[in-house]
Image: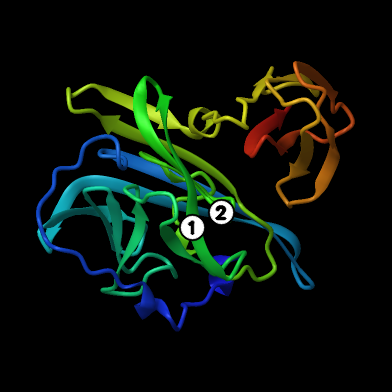
Amino acid sequence: MHPSKRRYRPYITALMVFWSLGITAQDDRTFPNVSAEFTMAWPCIDGVNGPYTVWEVITYSAQPSVQHLGLEWGAFGSQGGRLAVDGDRVLLWGPVDVYVPQDSIVQLYDFGLAVGDTAYYDYYYTYGHAVVVEVEVVQVLGRDRRRLELDNGDVWLEGVGSLFGVVRPLWMTPLGCADPVYTFCAEYADDQGEAYTWCSNIILGVPNRTERVLNLAPNPSNGSFTVRGGSPGAPYQLRDLQGRTIQRGSLMGGVDRFDLHGLPAGIYLFHSNNAVVKVILE
């Protein structure tokens, strides 16, 4: 979904959120409280350009912030957008690319939702309300985080947002592009002042009852590598950055060995266990 090919929704006002005002301190759990960078790679193809990849990078910085409606808003995106944390909620104040128009405020996340609650209306896949089907607490880097699974396959994790992209709740109908690949890195300082960093190679491996952590090594490689931690019989796909499937099959589980010496050097994406691992061939 090339940014120039996405449209403002005519129904954006339906997403407006009103809440009781009150200043609440942001801790390190709800969202990055120092800075972050979110990268999306959109594999696209059309009759004029053929296959191509659109890179979309969204940065966030908590400071310097501005005061508005009793909240502190950090900088989000490259067009003057703002983001604030209000308790369990993450709010966006536009403009933010084509997702949120000028001077509009929408709710991006609410980590206080319970099973059965509506998270958002999914105009990307299901054209229906995405409903929370599971809430659990997981540990990442020794910190408890709430993890919300939605009935459209989306997964939210406190401190990150959607594991499919930071603005996943606002995605619109794709026009000529495949699902994106998402990477994430952020800096935090917890309530004890301890600084630490999270990146997607940690976050995307958060296990639940049905998922396992994938460990691919060596990476980079010359074409030979192993994948550990896959579920026996789980399907996998290896794709290039244009979204083309290079190889597919099922994992044996335990240790799976791959030989990709016939492929050109570059970056590929290994999909399995609801996770995506970047494969670098040298």
The furthest residue to the right: 262
The furthest residue to the bottom: 10
Graded by Cα atoms within 10 Å as few (under 14), some (14 to 19) or many (20 or more), the crowding at tag 1 reads many
Q: Quadrant of the N terminus?
A: bottom right
Q: In which quarter of the image is the C terminus?
A: top right
Quarter of the view holding residue 160:
top left
Q: Is mark 1 on a helix, strand or loop?
A: strand
Left or right: residue 52 versus residue 157 is right
- Marks 1/2 in contact by CB < 8 Å: the verdict is yes
**In this picture, is 68 found above or below 35?**
below
In depth, the one of 219 and 245 nearer the eye is 245
In depth, the one of 178 and 235 nearer the eye is 235
Residue position marked by numbered label 2 in the rendering? 151
**In this picture, is 23 found above or below 212?**
below
Mark 1 and mark 2: Cα distance apart in space: 6 Å
Residue located 68% across and 20% down the image: 229
Quarter of the view holding residue 63:
top left
Left or right: residue 231 versus residue 38 is right
Q: What element carries label 2?
A: loop
**In this picture, is 193 found above or below 47?**
above
The furthest residue to the front: 116
In depth, the one of 234 and 163 nearer the eye is 234
In depth, the one of 148 and 44 nearer the eye is 148
Left or right: residue 265 versus residue 64 is right
Tell which circle, 1 or 2, labels the residue nearer the N-terminal end. Answer: 1
Residue type indicated by callout 2: Asp
Residue position marked by numbered label 1 in the rendering? 131
Quarter of the view holding residue 116:
bottom left
Q: Where is residue 278 in the image (x, y as percent from the top left)?
A: 65, 34
Q: Where is residue 9 in the image (x, y as percent from the top left)?
A: 47, 78
